[in-house]
Image: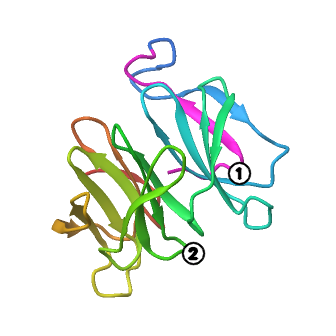
Amino acid sequence: CSEFNSSYYIIGGECCTDGQEGGKMCVVKLINYDNTSLYTQCLTCDGQYLWVSLDGLFAEDKVVIWKMTVDGIIEKKIYPPEMDPSGLEWDGQYLWSVDGSYGGENKINKLSTDGQVVDSFNPINYPWGLAWVNPYLYVSDWKSDLPGGNKIYKITTSGQVVGSFEFKDGYGLAWDGQFLWGVSNPDNDPAEI
């Protein structure tokens, strides 16, 4: 997840040959929404559309998820029950959203594409980052001062923890098809896991 204060950065990948410089990823498109009081929280892709979760702490829409094209056209808005989304992922059929960070209920919601909660569970203390590695979810627990913190958990889609490993102050997670990547606070350096 990335928070860029209502700007969405789309970076080049395997399908982007003109956006690469010396093997490094670079920004190839910027979609900016300066006229919104919403803050971007997380981003996932379903293969065709981007799904962006936004937190409007002082806005009329407290939490909203936009389904949008890569050109920035908002196709749909859904209003999940989360207080503060900190993780968003797509499994091929459903959206998964972490209601964690600050003020949330510290749970993971399985959402239909119209925003309805299909399932919900709370397998760990303070979930934050989220990655889908079929058929499991990997969830970071960022709260380092509590038992169970400083770990990344491997969980089933019903919320059962099937494994974990140490990862200090874990925030964002991503799966690149081969490796799980994580961002740790306070240094925010991405790490291959």
Q: Label 1 neighbourhood size at 10 Å, few (<14), some (14-19), many (20+)?
A: some
Task: Name the amino acid, label 1.
Answer: Asn
> Which is nearer the eye, 47 or 164?
47
Please say if the residues under marks 1 and 2 sit with CB atoms less than 8 Å apart.
Answer: no
Q: Which residues lie in the magenta part? A: 1-16
In the displayed structure image, the side of residue 93 where residue 104 appears, left or right: right
Q: As displayed, is residue 97 above or below residue 66?
A: below
Q: Which mark is residue 5?
A: 1
Outermost left residue: 162
In the displayed structure image, the side of residue 56 where residue 19 appears, left or right: left
Q: Which mark is residue 102?
A: 2
Q: Nearer the viewer, mark 1 or mark 2?
A: 2
Q: Which mark is residue 116?
A: none
Task: Tell me, yes or no, if residue 155 can be seen here.
Answer: yes
Q: CA distance from mark 1 to mark 2?
A: 17 Å
Quarter location, residue 128: bottom left
Q: Secondary structure at mark 2?
A: loop
List x then y, in percent, for residue 149: 32, 78
At 31% from the left and 47% from the top, the residue drawn is 132
At 29% from the left and 87% from the top, the residue drawn is 147
Is 73 within the magenta?
no
List x then y, in percent, for residue 177: 25, 35
In the displayed structure image, the side of residue 175 where residue 12 appears, left or right: right
At 45% from the left and 75% from the top, the residue drawn is 106
Q: Main secondary structure of the magenta part?
A: loop
List x then y, in percent, for residue 16: 45, 16
